[in-house]
Image (tube, rainbow, N blue to C red):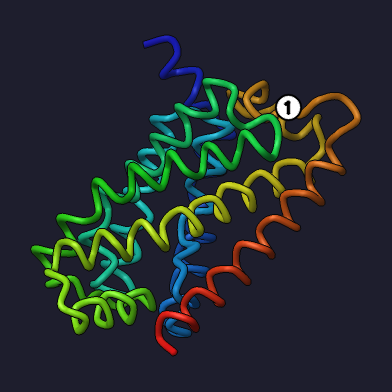
Amino acid sequence: MNWLKKDFNIMTWVLIPVAIAINVAIGQIVVLLRLPLYLDSIGTVLVGAVCGPMAGLLTGMLSNIIWGLAIDPNALPWFPVAGVIGLVAGLCANAGLFKSWWKVVVTGFLIALGAVVSGTPISVYLYGGITASGSAFITAFLLQTGQDIVSAVLSTNFLIEPIDKISTALLAFAILQGLSQRFVARFPRPENVTAEKGQNRTQLFIAVGVVIVLVLLAAFVVVRILG
């Protein structure tokens, strides 16, 4: 239990509500704008990276539970997926996959796989494949082309989730690289996000640049599919 006590220090409990607020605020904006991405797990990945997998798991689950109970009931059933996202982010960070932008891309892809596996059954059996997110337009289009519901949901998820989760992980990484090392050192696992010496600013710019490219790519793909 020593590692659990270490991960849940005072800074962890301070960061969790901030991360939840980030998740809910950005997630609600994305839902209202019907964007094809989600971007509602940036805070969860932040906590998982610097506080450990169990803290990430708790943050993700609480985010969707609070979001669902207070604002949008459609967010509530996704709390297991949000928990998986935080758990995988923390495990990847513990394994050293949060120290450079290209490793964070790998982390985002692994998070996306976890989200697809845990989220597809919820989408299919609870919502019939058509959720409140902007990506539902793609699922509806694929259903019209003759695909069965499971194939349509999986196709949509494998298209959107990697772009979304890689963007989410890179944004979290950019935020952490923009913080002072002295401040980051207060969290339980600062070594997880320590970039190579002298590379912090470079890593930040690269991460933001890759996110912009990914978002533009997502918009292009959606336009091509729906157009």
Residue 18 visible here: no
Residue visible at 52% across and 37% down in the picture? 107
Residue 147 as seen in the image, left or right of residue 13: left
Tell which of 42 and 104 is nearer to you. 104
Tell which of 194 and 13 is nearer to you. 194
- Horizontal and vertical percent position of residue 81: 29, 50
Residue visible at 44% across and 74% down in the picture? 36
Mark 1 belongs to which amino acid? Thr
Q: Residue furthest bottom?
A: 227
Residue 57 visible here: yes
Q: Reply above or below: 194 against 18.
A: above
Tell me the quarter of the picture where residue 196 sits: top right
Residue 59 as seen in the image, left or right of residue 219: left
Q: Reply above or below: 25 against 205.
A: below
Q: Reply above or below: 96 against 147.
A: above
Q: What is the secondary structure assignment of the residue under circle 1? A: loop
